[in-house]
Image (cartoon, rainbow, N blue to C red):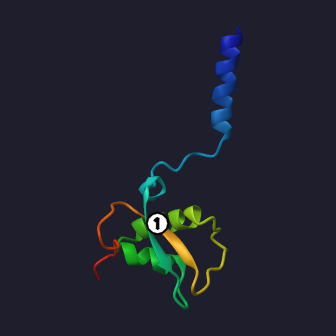
């Protein structure tokens, strides 16, 4: 009976926790570029430098905010350094070809 109660409690606890965002590969990345924010730059514009796909840019923007402890409303300023998760580590920064 105690074992069944423990299992039920564990299931209830897992159901109450916010879902893990395992579908966002950027949040699982262990490779990062360091970017210095330029004047008038946004987290979105930084994310858009790394991919031409808008859905990927949205996932990357979410990861940049998470990795740097920012909220979507957090302002960023010129000169600020941000970690940008990248999906693979090359010798050069992983930028989108435009």
Q: Which residue is mark 1?
A: 60
Residue 1 placement, left or right of 86: right
Quarter of the image where the N terminus is located: top right
Residue, x 66% and y 74% (percent of image)?
Answer: 74
Which residue sits at x=29%, y=66%? 90
Side (left or right) of 98 relative to 35: left
Residue, x 55% and y 77% (percent of image)? 81
Asked where in the image residue 86 lies, by quadrant, the reply is bottom left
Residue appearing at x 66%, y 14% in the figure? 4
Callout 1: SS: helix
- Splitting the image into 4 quarters, where does residue 7 fall? top right
Observer-nearest of 14 and 27: 27
Give the residue at the far top of this rendering.
1
Q: Where residue 29 sits: x, y (%)?
A: 43, 56
Q: Residues within 10 Å of mark 1 (few under 14, many from 20)?
A: many
* Residue closest to the far front: 91
Which of the image's four quarters has the C terminus?
bottom left
- Residue closer to the observer: 70 or 4: 70
77 above or below 55? below
Residue 46, x across and y down, in percent: 47, 78
Question: Residue 50, position in %: x, y?
Answer: 38, 73
């Amino acid at each position: 009976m105690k074992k069944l109660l423990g299992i039920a409690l564990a299931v209830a606890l897992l159901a109450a926790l916010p879902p893990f965002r395992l579908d966002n590969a950027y949040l699982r990345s262990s490779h990062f570029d360091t970017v210095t924010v330029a004047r008038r730059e946004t987290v979105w514009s930084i994310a858009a430098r790394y991919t031409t796909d808008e859905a990927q840019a949205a996932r990357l923007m979410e990861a940049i905010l998470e990795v740097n402890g920012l909220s979507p409303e957090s302002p960023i300023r010129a000169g600020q350094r941000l970690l940008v998760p990248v999906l693979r580590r090359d010798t050069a920064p992983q930028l989108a070809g435009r």
